Image (spheres, rainbow, N blue to C red):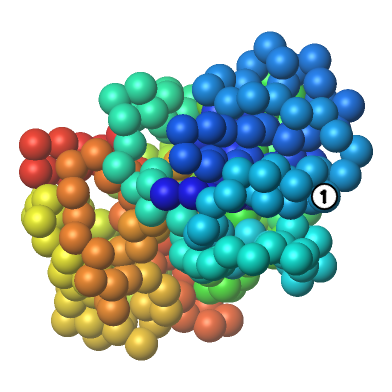
Amino acid sequence: MNYIVKDENAIYYECGYSSDNALFLKLGSEAFFLTDSRYAIEAENLVKGATVIIERDLYAKANSIIKTSKIKKLTYDPKEWSIFHFEKITKDLKIKLQALPDLSHKKRIIKSDEELKIIKKAVKLGAKAFDRFAKDIQKNGFESSEYNLTYMAKKALSKKGEYELSFDPIVAVKGNAAKPHALPTSEKLHKKDLLLVDAGLKYKRYCSDRTRTVYAKDDFSFDTIQKFKSKKIQKAYDTVLKAHDNAIEKARSGMKAKEVDALTRKIIEKAGFGEYYVHSTGHGVGLDIHEMPYIASKSDTVIEDGMVYTIEPGIYIPNEFGIRIEDMVTMIEGRVVVL
């Protein structure tokens, strides 16, 4: 297949290096990495399996290479391209242009053994960061706003700049946790409040992703065993944990993603919280924080060994509270292994 790639993580997957101004071309047996002079030294040293080309106008050069190659068809992912750049790259090309959404994600859906090692390390580092964050809160986080807690979370996750973050952390107190992608507010964390934290970091570019909901007492930890004073919150929490554990215990390679989704959804619906479960069970994680497979109620994707995805059921009752428990898993010899 002849194809062109623009997304930075997709390019990295192809040749081991990328920059914020680069293109990757695969034309028959030849591959080309195009970037500008700012990245020449790193590209020459780090790009693998492709000819490095340094140009000011990457799009005109790529257009020229495609014309010279005399290929008849070029595949691209339309999600990667603006109209402006796509028109530049395809100007006067007399070949068939084939749109293939999620081109790179489909190639990356099964992780190699080396990728699994890196992702497992990212997950372990992320878990340690949660432990650091818990200690930081116990030391000086109570009576702090969500704004300040989010800043503290970033510091704990990055280990003062050593690691990049997978995404901006979600740190939500009480009613704000009822928003699955809550933004920080001036709401302050008091002892005995409900606290939801969704966060991750990157190791060798691969992401981790984890969510815990806790009862924020003096010596709390981000374990999955939590005891709340409110019976309603406790019932909801226990339901989410049961749904989470059920998907870990019963998911199998060969199932469709929608069948895995049902392993969480049916438990939450049976407990009477179905209307408050407002998102899918999970999503793939790798170089991107959201990639294939998507563990959703309408997905016919067949789950296979080597796939990495999250299990993250939740219950969100507006203006009251939200609960989510999330872990990253992979499939090994047909069964779930928690990373």
Measuring 80% from the left and 15% from the top, which residue is drawn there?
41
> Between residues 238 and 165, which one lies in front from this camera angle?
165
Image spot of residue 119 (x, y percent): 41, 31
Quadrant in the rendering for residue 145: bottom right
The residue under label 1 is 60
Which residue shows up at 53% across the image and 73% down it? 178
From the viewer's perspective, is residue 330 above or below residue 98? above
Does 326 sit above or below residue 96?
above
Task: Identify which residue, 292 or 155, lies in the foreground.
Answer: 292
Q: Is residue 243 above or below residue 279?
A: above
| Residue 278 position in % (x across, y down) | 42, 79
Residue closest to the eye, 305 or 131 = 305
- Residue 113 visible (yes or no): yes
Q: Tag 1's secondary structure?
A: helix
Q: Can see residue 190?
A: no
- In the image, taking residue 38 as reference, residue 88 lies left or right, namely left
What's the residue at 75%, 28% (across, down)?
53
